[in-house]
Image: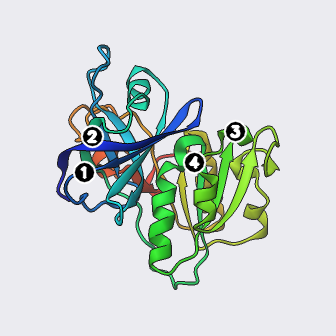
Amino acid sequence: MRKYVLDLTVVENVRLHPDCCLLKLTAGVPLPETVPGQFAEVRVDGAPGTFLRRPISIHYVDRARNELWLLIRLAGEGTRRMAETGAGEALNLLLPLGNGFSLPQEPVGARLLLAGGGVGVAPLLYLGDRLRQTGFTPAFLLGARTREDLLQLEAFRERGAVYVTTEDGSLGEKGRVTDHSVLRQERFDRLYVCGPKPMMVAMGGYAMRTGTPCEVSLENTMACGLGACLCCVERTKAGHVCVCTEGPVFEVSQLEWNL
């Protein structure tokens, strides 16, 4: 897939949480075609200690408005500078990068569960939207530490049933994503997962035990996004690969994880 370097203009910067914001960006040309699960490398200007671009999942693409959304977690100087950009300012993006989620081949009535933890929910909104466009009705299983840490709940509810866990029990079922009763009470035909690695490993184990196809989106450190720096190497059954070029999405059975 062709890659583009584009200056995108901030339409809106929405602070969703003290440590997270939603950037809505647009361009003077039609946005390139992207697949849910792909990401962008964002150049950070005005941060002297930040030399490399920052990899950010594509949260959503609104074709009618020609908008691309990025969900930003404020983790360091680079992302904090990005979170300070206001309407009318420009960000330079290299995109689309990596390989995204695959759309299911099952019948339209198949049960699809999209599970995410923390800011790992980011690529699942666009995926859920694309699944609905192709006739599926996805369900979402979202987890966070507290109710305040759950992001974009209403946007997810517009696209399917939403199951929630919080570690403190302030919303939904108490516990982690893998503790939710829906995993014991219902059978799903396919899983899509993104979040902290321990959560993805646990969901991968569930998938292997139940014989459920499962794709996970890895969040390895990706400095260049082009497979040159080797920061994001992951061990798979086919050997060591760069997550930024071979992933970030993998069928969980391909990975050398202890499931």
Q: Nearer the viewer, residue 11 or 49?
A: 11
Compared to 100, does 165 lie above or below? above
Name the residue: 72% across, 53% down.
164
At mark 1, the secondary structure is loop
Q: Residues within 10 Å of mark 4 (few under 14, many from 20)?
A: many
Residue at mark 1: 27
Amino acid type, mark 4: Met
Residue 259 in sight in this render: no
Q: Are marks 3 and 1 in contact (CB under 8 Å)?
A: no
Precedes in sequence: disc 1 or disc 4: 1
Compared to 245, does 157 lie above or below? below
Q: Are marks 3 and 4 in contact (CB under 8 Å)?
A: no
Residue at mark 4: 200
Precedes in sequence: disc 3 or disc 1: 1
Q: Residues within 10 Å of mark 1 (few under 14, many from 20)?
A: some
Label disc, if present, on residue 182 of the rendered structure: none
Amino acid type, mark 1: Ala
Q: Nearer the viewer, mark 3 or mark 4?
A: 3
Residue at mark 2: 225
Mark 2 → mark 1, Cα distance in angstroms: 21 Å
Amino acid type, mark 3: Glu
Precedes in sequence: disc 2 or disc 3: 3
Mark 1 → mark 4, Cα distance in angstroms: 34 Å
Q: Dividing the picture into quarters, in which one does residue 114 lie? A: bottom right
Whole-percent x, y for residue 191 in the image: 56, 64
Name the residue: 51% across, 57% down.
124
Label disc, if present, on residue 148 of the rendered structure: 3
Q: Residues within 10 Å of mark 3 (few under 14, many from 20)?
A: few
Precedes in sequence: disc 2 or disc 1: 1
Precedes in sequence: disc 3 or disc 4: 3
